[in-house]
Image: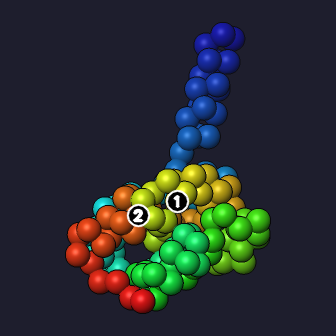
Amino acid sequence: MKRLTFLLTLVFALASQSPLVAADADKPKAVKHVNAVGAAKVLKDDSKVVVLDIRTPKEFKAGHIKGAKNIDFYEDDFEASLKKLETDETYLVHCASGGRSTKALELFKKLGFKSVIHLDGGFKDWEKSGQPVEK
């Protein structure tokens, strides 16, 4: 009897970790981290990636990645603004140097975003590596 209980427990434990279990289907994938060169390659390879710049409007106006959408991390309605976005799209998220965007990653997971790419080093790294800036 102990052996049967052990085997059943083992089977259920393994089944719950199987990639075929539907419960994992709706969970967000892990966040992918890239540097500025990697981010530029992602944008070149996939025109559907949405660049999400979470700096302040003043920072954004001073220069940003072409086509970026600006949602201010410091605004009271930041979470509500994220909730308006399509969670099935791929987002390249950044701030100035990576602090705010790193803090925001858990919120993206909580809201069920499926594909998030984090620009490590933020916009400063983007500029430093010589990537194009739009004003």
| Image marks 1 and 2: residues in contact by CB distance under 8 Å | yes
Local crowd at mark 1 within 10 Å, few (<14), some, or many (≥20)?
many
Q: Using the image as rendered, state which of residue 73 and residue 7 is in the foreground.
A: 73
Residue 131's disc number: none
Residue at numbered disc 2: 122
The amino acid type found where label 1 is placed reads Ser
Quadrant placement of the C terminus: bottom left
Secondary element at tag 2: helix
Viewed as shown, does residue 85 lie left or right of 17?
A: right
Point out residue 101 in the picture as x, y percentages from the top left corner: 52, 59
Residue furthest top as drawn = 2
SS class, disc 1: helix
Q: Residue furthest left?
A: 130
Residue behind mark 1: 101
**Tag 2: amino acid:** Gly
Q: CA distance from mark 1 to mark 2?
A: 8 Å
Q: Where residue 97 appears, x then y in whole percent?
A: 42, 59
Q: Residues within 10 Å of mark 2 (few under 14, many from 20)?
A: many
- The one of 95 and 80 positioned closer to us in this rendering: 95
